[in-house]
DNA sequence: CGTCGAATACTCGGATCCGAGTGATAGGAG
DNA sequence: CTCCTATCACTCGGATCCGAGTATTCGACG
């Protein structure tokens, strides 16, 4: 319908790489390290394999280029990359588009909720409760980390807004879960006869 | 940290296939059709290629099996599948686990927000506003469709809860976007000197 | 001074994904 | 009766993804 343009490099990890190189040239292994140090691996899936692939793709596309290949000590060679003019342009264009037009996302939880019926009322409540606990924990962790970083005063808020977004989304999910659990227990959400529900679903699932 | 077990078939589309077969045997092409008719393609990414791969994987894993291969008219043969006992068990176990333990998700918007700085204050506001409009539209559409289905009274609420979840998440995103836009305009969220921000970002991005 | 574990830096190949393509037929327009 | 389009049902191969593996080196500890 409104399919966004076919981008040469589609893996978001490429955006992260570009973003890092805007600050300073770096080699892949170092990128992975910084990404993880800064906790950016919450927003980007950073796996070594993909990283090297993405860097190669970025180079093929002409958005970054090898600056030099050096060897420190007897370690394996490292290839240091820097962004090109084209890369700089593409970076902001990419961010801009990702913000402007919502991409189709397929969170796994959504697919599971589509078949919530399969667990039966009791199974559903049990599973949802457990999720709620985990989500709450993760939320509090993110919130805590965010607060600490801000209070340390080294990093401006602009560079941590994504945590605020993440927390908001987790809050919303949590609220929904709690509401649905209440609805099930209060009989506002019921299982029709026909539902694929087995009362022993809970046993089976564990 | 808490990595969930390695499932034989990992593509959520497999869950959808299993779900459909719980109702009645079907052949891949028909599955795709029903999935789309019911609007389930909002929760599952259904592409022909993947569908056939997933069905094959499901069969290899022994969760489904070919029932018969028939030919209607002179059309290509169609292979009709049905679930196995193992498949039925695995189905509820899968749903249960997807609900219980939140998977790491990497929504593209989150990665973009991590680099919101790149757009500069004006560019960011413009892009966020446009997204807000689109999200609002999509939300109202889902809401509308959900209401109509319920009022028609054919489908029990249990089978449409995923739409309620989706709407809630969109509401939360919208609220956050509006808040951030306000914060930028009110000077509560500012760009430090050092920010990679070009004032012509908006021009460039179009 | 030897060795054991952690860190450094990257490669490799299998698994998965997916869109474009294939080819046949049914149904309707003229 | 012929053509043309839509539907049916699936295949194929390139692109991408990613975890496990490799090989080296540094540092700590006994």
Image (tube, coloured by chain):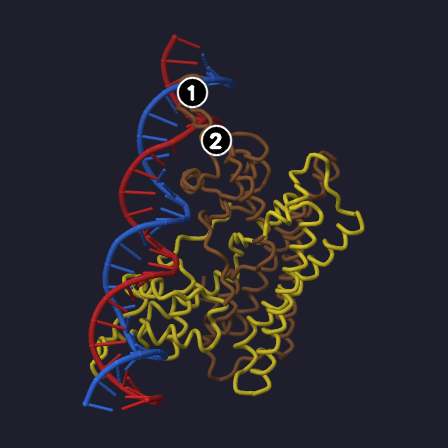
Chain colours: A brown, B yellow, C red, D blue
Vertical placement of residue B203 versus A77, above or below: below
**Residue depicted at x 68% and y 45%:** B120
The residue carrying mark 2 is A81
* Disc 1 to disc 2, C-alpha distance: 14 Å
B157 relative position to A48: left or right: right
Residue B69, placed above or below residue B127: below
| Residue plotted at (50% across, 70% down) | A114
Same subunit, labels 1 and 2: the answer reads yes
Q: Residues within 10 Å of mark 1 (few under 14, many from 20)?
A: few
Residue B190: image quadrant is top right
Residue receiving disc 1:
A71
Q: Secondary structure at mark 2?
A: strand
Q: Residue furthest right?
A: B186
Q: Depth-wise, is mark 1 or mark 2 nearer the camera?
A: 2
Name the foreground residue: A197 vs A114.
A114
Mark 2 surroundings within 10 Å by alpha-carbon count, few (fewer than 14), some (14 through 19), many (20 or more): many
Vertical placement of B169 versus B107: above or below? below
């Amino acid at each position: 319908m409104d399919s966004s343009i076919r981008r040469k490099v589609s893996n978001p990890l490429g955006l992260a790489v570009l973003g890092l190189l805007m600050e300073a040239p770096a080699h892949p292994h170092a990128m992975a390290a910084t990404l993880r140090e800064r906790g950016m691996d919450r927003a980007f899936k950073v796996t070594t394999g993909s990283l090297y692939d993405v860097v190669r793709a970025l180079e093929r596309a002409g958005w970054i280029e090898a600056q030099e290949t050096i060897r420190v000590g007897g370690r394996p060679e490292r290839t240091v990359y820097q962004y090109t003019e084209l890369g700089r342009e593409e970076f902001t264009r990419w961010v801009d588009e990702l913000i402007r037009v919502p991409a189709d996302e397929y969170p796994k939880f959504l697919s599971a909720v589509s078949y919530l019926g399969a667990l039966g009322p009791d199974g559903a409540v049990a599973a949802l409760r457990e999720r709620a606990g985990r989500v709450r924990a993760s939320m509090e962790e993110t919130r805590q980390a965010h607060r600490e970083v801000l209070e340390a005063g080294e990093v401006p808020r602009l560079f941590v807004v994504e945590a605020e977004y993440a927390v908001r989304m987790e809050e919303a999910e949590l609220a929904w879960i709690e509401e649905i659990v209440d609805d099930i227990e209060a009989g506002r959400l019921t299982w029709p006869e026909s539902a694929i529900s087995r009362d022993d679903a809970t046993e089976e699932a564990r």
